[in-house]
Amino acid sequence: MGRHDVAAYEYLSQAEHFADLFNAKFFGGRPVVDSEKLLEADGRTGGNGKNSQYRDIIKRLPNGARFVILAIENQDNVDYEMPWRIMGYDHAEYRRQIRQIHKQKRLEGSKAGKKLSWLETMMDAKDKLSPVWTICFYHGKQPWTGPRSLKDMVDLGDFPMEFNDYQMHLVCVDDVGLAENCNTQLGLLLRVLAARGDRKQMEALKNSGELDNLDAETGKAIAELADMPKLLEYVENDKQDGKDGEYSMCVAIDEMVAEGRQEGRREGMLQALVGLVKDSVLTVEQAAERANLSVSEFEAKAKEL
């Protein structure tokens, strides 16, 4: 699990944020998933040993005599196998439940002095499974260009047959209306992640006042997921000093915007030097020296430009 996925895991593992994401995605922000009722669940599915699969975050929500199984898979990069992966995780959870039914029937038979056959332990009309919902939470910087369902992974060609699809519940940080449907500071995290890389959006977000009361947990998650080390430094220092860090975000954004402007000026200078090399005004060695880079570093930067 990468650094960004660890940060997302730590933040969304908290019941209030976990419930908020599900409520924002499926219920328009209505508190259908009650964070106070969520129960921890074993993230391992598919049995023991080499056949085990581990969910990023999985919780159980009481639903009458049964449970609803809710899970989140954090994703930092575009994965073109993601719908198939999610289908596999969900299948493994349903298989675990079916095996538990088989086990329970064998146990009841044993108590009654009977050794049931495999057929006798299978599900019957009265047996039901707990439903499973999995969200793929994509927090990467690039737009999601991967498939959103199993059908997107399949080439049907001209074959005239309806495909039995498996839909993936994808959540991207910039999904329209998602942040507005949040009732915790998860919404602020989504807004910042959607605005990263855009200095004007970040300045507008800072000036809106939405970030004036940022809590330390959300500040840390933003610092890690948005690659803002200065903010992480402020949050950690405020924790040590017993402060809540409510102004750290604005200071960090100011510094990030300033660094972005500086980087923009440096990129402009490099573009000019590359142009002078192409026009044979400067040698590569002379241009690299003016850019305070080695020749290999300058050539690599030139390729990027």
Image (cartoon, grey):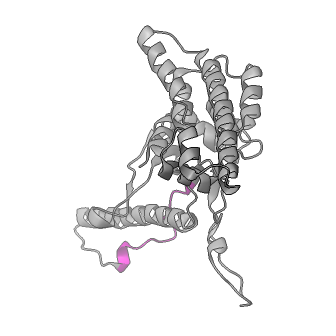
Please provide percent x and percent y for residue 162: 71, 82
In this view, the residue in front, 226 or 108, is 226
Image quadrant in which you'd find residue 265: top right
In this view, the residue in front, 99 or 127, is 99
In this view, the residue in front, 50 or 262, is 262
Tell me if residue 67 can be seen. Answer: no
| Residue 188 drawn above or below residue 86 | above
Please provide percent x and percent y for residue 157: 71, 87
Q: Is residue 138 left or right of residue 30?
A: left
Please provide percent x and percent y for residue 228: 55, 31
Confirm whether the magenta stretch covers residue 120.
yes
Q: Residue at x 67, y 17 (%)?
A: 212
Q: Is residue 300 left or right of residue 170?
A: left
Please provide percent x and percent y for residue 135: 58, 52
Q: Is residue 81 left or right of residue 237?
A: right
Query: Residue farthest to the left?
Result: 113
Confirm whether the magenta stretch covers residue 209.
no
Image quadrant in which you'd find residue 186: top right
Query: Residue farthest to the front?
Result: 281
Tell me if residue 186 can be seen. Answer: yes
Q: What is the magenta range?
A: 119-134
| Residue 141 drawn above or below residue 126 | above
Could you tell me what secondary structure mostly forms the magenta stretch? loop
| Residue 260 drawn above or below residue 110 | above
Q: Residue at x 54, y 24 (%)?
A: 231
In this view, the residue in front, 10 or 69, is 10
Q: Is residue 53 left or right of residue 32?
A: left
